[in-house]
Image (cartoon, rainbow, N blue to C red):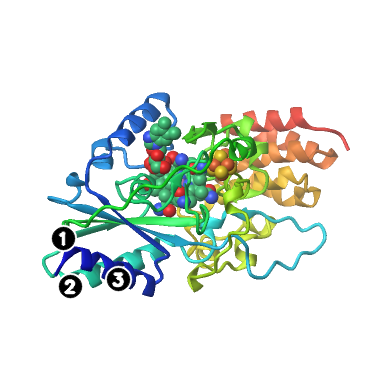
Amino acid sequence: MNINQLKEEIIQYSKSIGIDKIGFTTAATFDELKNRLLRQQELGYQSGFEEQDIEKRVDPARLLEEPRSIIAIALAYPSKMNGRVESKKGERRGIFCRASWGLDYHHIVRDRLNKLEEFIVSKVPEARLKSMVDTGELSDRAVAERAGIGWSGKNCAIITPEFGSYVYLGEMITNLPFAPDEPMEDRCGECRKCLDACPTGALVQGGQINAKRCVAFLTQTKDFVPDEFREKLGNRIYGCDSCQTACPENKGKNFHFHEEMEADPETVKPLLKPLLRISNREFKEKYGSLSGSWRGKKPIQRNAVIALAHFKDDTAIEELTYVMNEDPRPVLRGTAAWALGKIGGSIAEEELQRAQSVEKDAEVLKEIEKGLSLLVKK
Ligand code: B12
Ligand code: SF4
Ligand code: SF4
């Protein structure tokens, strides 16, 4: 079959299986990305979640023998929920970022890539293909940028003119010599809205992030959140959308193309207090299908504690005291002690003093001291 005709058929087929945008690029090495990754590594700006072998990240030939092209795909996700939570006065809720609404996007994008692979193999049985999304070696954004899916914004996101930056990305390396598409022109211009909106200054300059300062990263760590960032988390219990919601290119962009991506408001805007004592089983049942649960319940619970401090929710004192005294995990006990200090009042003070006399863990004791020093008498 003629390769150009096959490309056209793939484009047509992709539309029929819920791929919202598709682009093609060569399998050449990603040289600019390589320098960038080395620099980020040198500066200590990497999250640690990315593939650590830089050669594999920039050279498709290390992932598939004799690659000739890469197909990049994008799926648009909703930016607004259909439906809302039943809010009662005084009930405090956390928020999962949009990329964690609905079914874990890895499954959704993977499903589309599998279908596309089957289609290509049905046309070219000898085709060799290798697909990935997020957890693969390649930089999904660098591939998407080169394949003309969108431009690389100052907020680091790939922004499509059609769907804004609210798109999941995935790709397939192939041994078929498809003609590449043209990359797109950068449309950020003089705008700096994302940089100004970032709560922690994680965007050190347009297109460069210090992932260690990024709230999205911090919500996914399992240790104590460094002091300077705790208040910046606000009520975010997984991820951060601030540099995307601030972006004018996302204005009015809200697409509901994929049933699986619809969010259950009660799940993605959960009440905070019940999270503190949730069992493993219940956590798995309620949150296990979200991408935001990939690090387990500990970071989510720690972030819920921080969010209760953010709201200064004094109806949470009893629950937080329980966590400070009874939770087996030092990070949870310590963060709860800090939160009690933030919320303040005589009960919190008494409880902190009591805990100080029995706690044995050095890090938790430090947090109890911090809590006591934060106390504002009510
Ligand atoms: C590690 C990681 C993170 C880290 C680090 C993020 C980062 N900006 O690097 C943390 C945990 C912070 C994170 C957060 C988020 N992530 Co993330 N993450 C990844 C992951 C696994 C690797 C990214 C990576 O390698 N970064 C290293 C940097 C150096 O490279 P890069 O951003 O991939 O590539 C760009 C730069 O290299 C740049 N570049 C190269 N050279 C040069 C030179 C100059 C001068 C400049 C200006 C730029 C530049 O161009 C490339 C293309 O844009 C990818 C999946 C994957 N396998 O690629 C998802 C991915 C990037 N994440 C994604 C998402 C959705 C998010 C969040 C929006 C989730 C949320 N709501 O909380 C936030 C956004 C934060 C932000 N502003 O970037 C999507 C992005 C979709 C899109 N439209 O862009 C991806 C692609 C997952 C997916 N398959 O859909 N993430
Ligand atoms: S995700 Fe949040 S913290 Fe991270 S760069 Fe964007 S605005 Fe800043
Ligand atoms: S907010 Fe402005 S500068 Fe930032 S990504 Fe959007 S258009 Fe670009």
Q: Kindly report the distance in space between the C-alpha atoms of the residues bearing marks 2 and 1.
A: 12 Å
Q: What residue is pinned by disc 3? A: 115
Q: How many marks?
A: 3
Residue 46 vs residue 3: left or right? right
Instruction: Judge the density around disc 3: few (<14), some (14-19), many (≥20) Cα neighbours within 10 Å.
Output: some
Q: Is residue 13 above or below residue 222?
A: below
Amino acid type at mark 1? Arg
> Is 162 placed above or below 192 here?
below
| On-image quarter of the N terminus | bottom left
Q: Nearer the viewer, mark 2 or mark 3?
A: 2
Q: Which mark is residue 216?
A: none
Asked which secondary structure carries label 3, the reply is helix
User: Which one is in front, 18 or 187?
Assistant: 187
At which x and y percent is residue 302?
59, 46
Can residue 215 be seen here?
A: no
In the rendered image, residue 122, in percent from the top left (x then y), is placed at 18, 74
Name the residue carrying label 2: 123
The answer to whether residue 315 is left or right of residue 305 is: right
Q: Quadrant of residue 107?
A: bottom left
Give the percent coordinates (x, y) of residue 145: 38, 47
Residue beneath label 1, please?
128
The reply to whether dot 2 and dot 1 touch (C-beta < 8 Å) is no
Q: Residues within 10 Å of mark 2 (few under 14, many from 20)?
A: some
378 vs 71: above or below: above
Q: Is residue 318 visible?
A: yes
Question: Disc 2 on helix, strand or loop?
Answer: helix
Q: Given this view, does label 2 or label 1 mark the residue nearer the observer?
A: 2
| Alpha carbon distance from label 2 to label 3 | 13 Å
Quarter holding ligand 2: top right
